Amino acid sequence: MKTVIEVLSDIFMKAFENAGFDADLGRVVVSARPDLCQYQVNGAMGAAKLYHKAPFMIANDVLAQVKENDIIEKVEVVNPGFINITVKDKFVSSYMQDMLNAADCGFEKIKNPKTVVIDYGGPNVAKTLHVGHLRSAVIGEALKRMNRFYGNKVIGDAHLGEFGLQMGLIIHELSLRKPDLPYFDENYDGEYPKEPPFTLKDLEEIYPFASAKSKEDEEYLNAARQATAEMQKGRRGYRALWRHIINVSVPDLKRNYKRLDVDFDLWLGESDVESYIPDMVAEMKKGGFAYLSEGALVVDVKEDSDSQPIPPCIVLKSDGSAIYETTDLATLVQREKDFHPDRVMYVVDKRQFLHFERVFRCAKKTGIVPSNTELSFIGFGTVNGKDGKPFKTRAGGTMKLSDMIDMVEDAVHVKDEESMAPEEVKELAKIIGLAAIKYGDLMNPTESNYIFDLDKFTSFEGNTGPYILYTMVRIKSILAKLNEKNSGVMNNVKFTDFTCDSERDLALTLTRFSHTVKEAVKKDAPSMLCSYIYEISNKFNVFYHDKKILAEENETVLSSLVALITLTLNVLNICTNLLGFKAPEKM
Ligand code: ARG
């Protein structure tokens, strides 16, 4: 189905053209003044400059070209040249009827889908997921679902961090604690034990310990770097330990992502692109892009237009080892070869902007990716505590993601608790908790920081995930009651005339579904979907108070009311699913 904006734009673009102006000026937008009109065209102001004519006159010329039709109820020109549009109720009703009968509420997938790789999650092996990993997972998952719904071919990759210094730190620390393990004996050529020499709990203690120590002890840090380089070069024992670390850590990462209902198509890691590095480096040298600077191999990426200094992109460290830049560049080689993507999106903490800016420039300059491949950095802000500083545990430490989810599930208040079995309450707390976390995150513009406010996020009132779910559950319960009472009405529901203003208000908002989803996808903005479902929920609740649906006796009216609330629920279902959460049956 065409979006309402497209349907109206067709009319006004043609009118602009027939009046002798550029058709593009006739694009319709949602009204900025809903008290005056529903839609508007602002092109007359732009036309005034191009055609040297007063905008008011231009708008009137255009209006003269708009023929009587079944769509527009009222159209008028207001100063200085806005064209204000109100559509016919009948058009809104029939559009909703089509939405109700179509799949996906009439959303039409794009004709020319793009291949999009989304790099999100970004967990690091051996480090427990913490609050700093929340946003990449939640935003990336939403962008993945939104792009897929839009029609793009999407590949989500977790891009596991497992080839860097953290591995060297663990290996080195282990060599101090358990020097007798065969992994450290360079002359050992037997099989290594199948059982890892540590548990997940051990790793959770070893890594922070080693990391802290490396910050104070230069010699220790150097030894860990050395171990990293040797591990990368393929030292047998170190590779065996490396495998153990991955095998112990990845199932735990997967468990945590599952709790967030976040799921990746690929679990590739930094090490998976190891084999691409030598050729990539050779090409960069051959092309005259890479040169040695203080022992490291670098590529200049600064541009004349830069207002700040942009340091060169380091391709290899002086000891020949791969660093963050190296694996990100080689990953682009791999992605180009495997998927030839039109776009690669990176959902990463916005403080990593400069890293990606340099990697992107280097990849374009050296021809790793074609010049028309879009490389997008989707940088997100920090999750803060009420003090405005990065969110911490009460004791001042970094909060583990699993603890954070537990905390939210505990805080969720299930209304009908007494009437439910304990497992049911638990299950419900999970569903509501997930909505609280994800909505609380996604409602903010991605690049903004936000305050993680447990009481606010879990409240059933206000702009929150549980409020959205509560609205959906309310609709479900009305439909269930009507079904019990009068199942005849539930079949073949049909929209008829609106019976009150709040009904029309809700209806108009629902007809903007396709347009809103398209805009949210184009702008990489899940927050636009959050605003949209909040608006729908508010409008539904006003309507619900105005209209006693359950008491309605006129079957025609009732049928229309059922159609409206069913469509409301359908739209909310799709949007919440795109955002990555869902509504329970009751709560
Ligand atoms: N593991 C990285 C970190 O914790 C994030 C990875 C982001 N993605 C990427 N391709 N570099 O900072």
Image: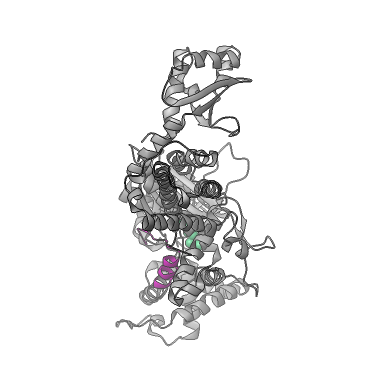
Give the residue at the far bottom of this rendering. 180
Q: Is residue 387 left or right of residue 561?
A: right
- 489 and 310: which is toward the camera: 489
Query: What span is in magenta?
Result: 251-267
**Residue 277, image x and y in percent?**
38, 56
Asked if residue 536 lies in the magenta stretch, the reply is: no
On the question of residue 341 being in view, the answer is: no
Which residue does the image show at 38% across and 76% down from the upper left?
244
- On screen, residue 349 above or below 370: below
Q: Quadrant of residue 18?
A: top left
How many numbered tags mark residues here? 0
- On screen, residue 188 above or below 216: below
- 478 and 288: which is toward the camera: 478
**Residue 510, image x and y in percent?**
46, 42
Q: Is residue 141 left or right of residue 440?
A: left
On the question of residue 47 being in view, the answer is: yes
Q: Is residue 507 left or right of residue 447?
A: left
Q: Quadrant of the N terminus?
A: top left
Give the residue at the far right of this rendering. 387
- 505 and 77: which is toward the camera: 505
**Residue 208, image x and y in percent?**
55, 75
Asked if residue 253 lies in the magenta stretch, the reply is: yes
Colour scheme shown:
one colour
Which residue does the image show at 37% across and 77% down from the upper left?
237
**Residue 507, image x and y in percent?**
47, 40
